[in-house]
């Protein structure tokens, strides 16, 4: 998500911590049931490990009683992801389901505590890490779709989202006299922030590479440096100094399109064209590179669908292998003729089953809503016999809708219920389908707005505290709703409410949504007798978490 650094003495240079399609919307490539839990926790753990130079003897994990994590950290993959991050693994590492055992083998002692810490964000991680020579206290939040922000280290306010290589310079109060802009320029960094933290001072340096102690000693001539920590970037697209993007709202994008067409004499721009304008500015990649990067994701998704249709199993799971039965029913002509929609449902089921068996999926925009948008794009692309590159273009177009949502709201069900996950996936899917059919950006955005309008108020109530039921059905709902809205937009239906206003309305709804309906497993279907019975059965299976 967009982050605004909390600055006391900071460089004046503009640092753009802006949403990227490949950071925030389509990705990460991961294993696990939830990107807010698994992937974000893993990235937080990775950076915490770096702060300890990879040497960790003991970790205390604390969760606020008022948040979502006390009831979900075990069953929705937070522990699995955090442990993998503390071990230095990637989000798609095949050892992740057994990361707890690997952490024990590494000799790391682990404790959990729940308390009333007053944390305002429902996905707040408080980590205290120790070894024989040092310890650090880290506070971080998972912001949705695998994104995160470290907001405090050892009492110092920071804003770290994994998009820079971080160098943390600790010293006495004399460092407070540093001019951050001078340090930034002399080091060649992207951003420098000087923060007072009690009796010590933190000089927080963000750059494209770690800053060496030798360079720091040459530049910092006031005060005394006590120690230096480094943490490597964990996002696929880094930020950089004076980063700017051409637009951050749908309205601004459409005005940009009008100006561009007027100046160039073009008839109109597609949402794909505008996504390239945006992501090229954000990432520094050219159009061909963007297509190839997204084509790689298309190939991963196709492999995941094939894996799902071949059959998956996992002990800690509510649903069995169902996509194979649906495929057989299609082949035998036993289903109501749904045309392309039946193929979408088939692919959605396959992708959700891969996710629930700890296979590799792409959080697009989240793991809980990982199936609708990819299934739509693959099904439409295959029906039109399009190349991976052409499918990638539609995914970039849909990703642009996700940029507006991530910039101004959230993908996290803990923040906004399933309207944030399924609603976003549906909006992205509708825009992608209009783009597949040659529609312009205005029609694509209208389809996206209609799709999200129809999903407002959707709660997140995972049965048995697993991300399967009703998540599968809500992914199907997202796709079928998107298909209808895309066709309506192509036919000229009026969305009435612009996309920016629809996103704002969804955010306002989320702010009034009870905690019980925002991925806490404390309301809705999650507290039905059947759900509770299934949860007890799974928790008593004795070998939950073992890959088959």
Image: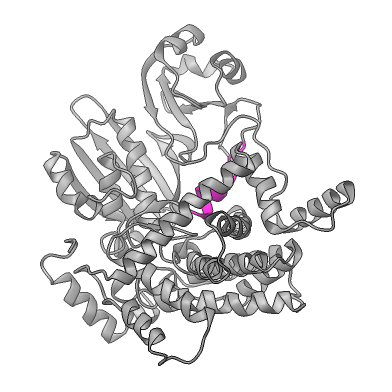
One can see residue 221 in this view: no
Q: Say left or right for 544 vs 30.
A: left
Question: In this picture, is 495 found above or below 27?
Answer: below
Q: How many marks?
A: 0
Q: Residue at x 58, y 32 (%)?
A: 240
Q: Can you give x and y, in whole percent of width and height, for residue 316 in the image?
A: 21, 68
One can see residue 473 in this view: yes
Q: Can you give x and y, in whole percent of width and height, for residue 57 in the image?
A: 18, 35
Question: In this picture, is 317 found above or below 43?
Answer: below
Q: Residue at x 79, y 53 (%)?
A: 257
Q: In which quadrant will I find the C terminus?
A: bottom left
Outermost front residue: 385
- What colouring does the structure picture have? one colour
Q: Which residues are magenta?
A: 16-26
Q: Quadrant of residue 351?
A: bottom left
Q: Can you give x and y, in whole percent of width and height, for residue 439 in the image?
A: 72, 66
- Nearest the viewer among 292 and 513 is 292
Q: Can you give x and y, in whole percent of width and height, for residue 186 in the image?
A: 57, 13
Q: Quadrant of residue 521?
A: bottom left
Q: Say left or right for 518 vs 488.
A: left
The reply to whether the magenta stretch includes residue 19 is: yes
Question: In this picture, is 61 found above or below 144?
Answer: above
Q: Say left or right for 419 vs 87.
A: right
């Amino acid at each position: 998500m967009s982050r605004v650094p909390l600055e006391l003495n900071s460089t004046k240079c503009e640092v753009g911590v802006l949403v990227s399609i490949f950071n925030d919307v389509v990705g990460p490539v991961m294993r696990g049931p939830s990107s807010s839990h698994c992937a974000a926790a893993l990235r937080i753990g990775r950076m915490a490990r770096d702060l300890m130079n990879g040497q960790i003897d003991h970790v205390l994990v604390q969760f606020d009683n008022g948040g979502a994590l006390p009831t979900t950290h075990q069953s929705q993959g937070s522990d699995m992801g955090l442990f993998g991050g503390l071990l230095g693994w990637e989000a798609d590492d095949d050892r992740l389901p057994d990361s707890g055992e690997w952490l024990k083998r590494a000799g790391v002692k682990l404790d959990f505590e729940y308390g009333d810490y007053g944390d305002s964000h429902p996905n707040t991680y408080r980590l205290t890490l120790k070894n024989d020579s040092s310890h650090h206290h880290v506070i971080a939040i998972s912001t949705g779709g695998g994104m995160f922000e470290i907001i405090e280290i050892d009492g110092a306010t920071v804003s770290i989202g994994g998009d820079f290589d971080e160098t943390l310079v600790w010293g006495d109060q004399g460092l407070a006299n540093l001019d951050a802009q001078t340090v930034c320029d002399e080091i060649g960094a992207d951003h420098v922030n000087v923060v007072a933290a009690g009796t010590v001072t933190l000089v927080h340096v963000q750059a494209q590479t770690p800053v060496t102690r030798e360079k720091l000693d040459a530049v910092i001539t006031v005060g005394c440096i006590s120690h230096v920590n480094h943490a490597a970037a964990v996002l696929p697209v880094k930020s950089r100094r004076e980063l700017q993007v051409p637009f951050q709202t749908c309205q601004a994008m459409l005005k940009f399109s009008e100006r561009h067409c007027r100046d160039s004499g073009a008839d109109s721009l597609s949402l794909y064209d505008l996504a390239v304008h945006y992501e090229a500015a954000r990432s520094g990649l050219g159009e061909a590179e963007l297509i190839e990067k997204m084509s790689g994701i298309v190939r991963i998704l196709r492999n995941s669908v094939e894996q799902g249709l071949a059959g998956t199993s996992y002990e800690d799971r509510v649903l069995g292998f169902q996509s194979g039965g649906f495929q057989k029913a299609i082949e035998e002509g036993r289903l109501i003729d749904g045309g392309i929609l039946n193929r979408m449902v088939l692919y959605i089921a396959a992708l959700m089953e891969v996710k629930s068996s700890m296979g590799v999926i792409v959080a697009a925009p989240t793991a809980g809503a990982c199936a609708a948008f990819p299934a739509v794009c693959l099904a439409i692309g295959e029906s039109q016999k399009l190349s991976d590159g052409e499918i990638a273009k539609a995914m970039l177009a849909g990703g642009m809708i996700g940029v507006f949502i991530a910039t101004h709201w959230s993908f996290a069900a803990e923040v906004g219920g399933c309207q944030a996950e399924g609603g976003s996936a549906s909006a992205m899917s509708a825009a992608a389908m209009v783009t597949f059919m040659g529609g312009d950006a205005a029609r694509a955005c209208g389809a996206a707005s209609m799709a999200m309008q129809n999903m407002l108020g959707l709660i997140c109530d995972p049965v048995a505290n697993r991300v399967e039921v009703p998540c599968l059905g809500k992914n199907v709902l997202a796709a079928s709703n998107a298909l209808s809205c895309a066709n309506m937009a192509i036919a000229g239906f009026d969305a009435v409410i612009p996309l920016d206003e629809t996103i704002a309305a969804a955010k306002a709804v989320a702010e009034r949504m009870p905690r019980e309906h925002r991925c806490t497993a404390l309301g809705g279907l999650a507290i039905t007798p059947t759900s509770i019975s299934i949860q007890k059965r799974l928790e008593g299976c004795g070998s939950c978490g073992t890959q088959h």
